[in-house]
Amino acid sequence: MDAGHLQPRRPLSSEAHLQQRFGVARDTVRRAIGHLAELGLVRTVPGKGTYVRATTRTQVTPEPGMRIITRPATKGEQDELELDAGAWVLVIERPNGELDVLPGDGAEIRVE
């Protein structure tokens, strides 16, 4: 992931494959995937698999007239931004009416 071996939005191998590849028990694989999920590096989609998350951060510098709020992500935003249920987003409304919606854990507000 951070080393670039696993590309963002690509699925991890199956638990069975990871067991064989690393010679470990299924519980060890599940704990490892759970730990990666806690770190925010992977996301599990029920019935589809576990996927590598994109880990880039977006810096937002407030401008005059800009409105920045946080709120829970809608279902559509969860799907589009690859967010878990209950995740929050950062909504940026620019003076010209343009909106940006960013994952709450992937954005940083920087005041200069």
Image (spheres, helix red, strand yellow):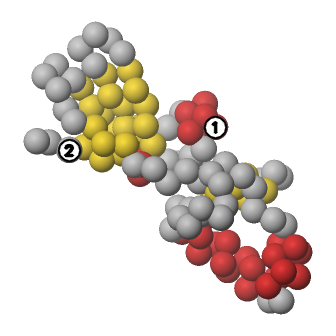
At x 53%, y 64%, the residue is 2
Residue 59 to residue 20: above or below: above
Callout 1: SS: helix
Q: Quadrant of the C terminus?
A: top left
Residue behind mark 1: 79
User: For mark 2, does the 10 Å Cα neighbourhood hold few (<14), some (14 to 19), or many (20 or more) residues?
Assistant: few
How far from the left and from the top, in percent, is residue 19? Answer: 84, 81
Residue 36 badge = none
Instruction: Identify residue type, mark 1.
Output: Asp
Using residue 46 as the reference point, say whether residue 71 is left or right of it.
left
Q: Earlier in the sequence, mark 1 or mark 2?
A: 1
Residue 111 to residue 47: above or below: above
Residue 20 to residue 93: above or below: below
Quadrant of the rendered image containing residue 41: bottom right
Camera sees residue 40: yes
Instruction: Identify residue type, mark 2.
Output: Arg
CA separation in Å, label 1 and label 2: 27 Å
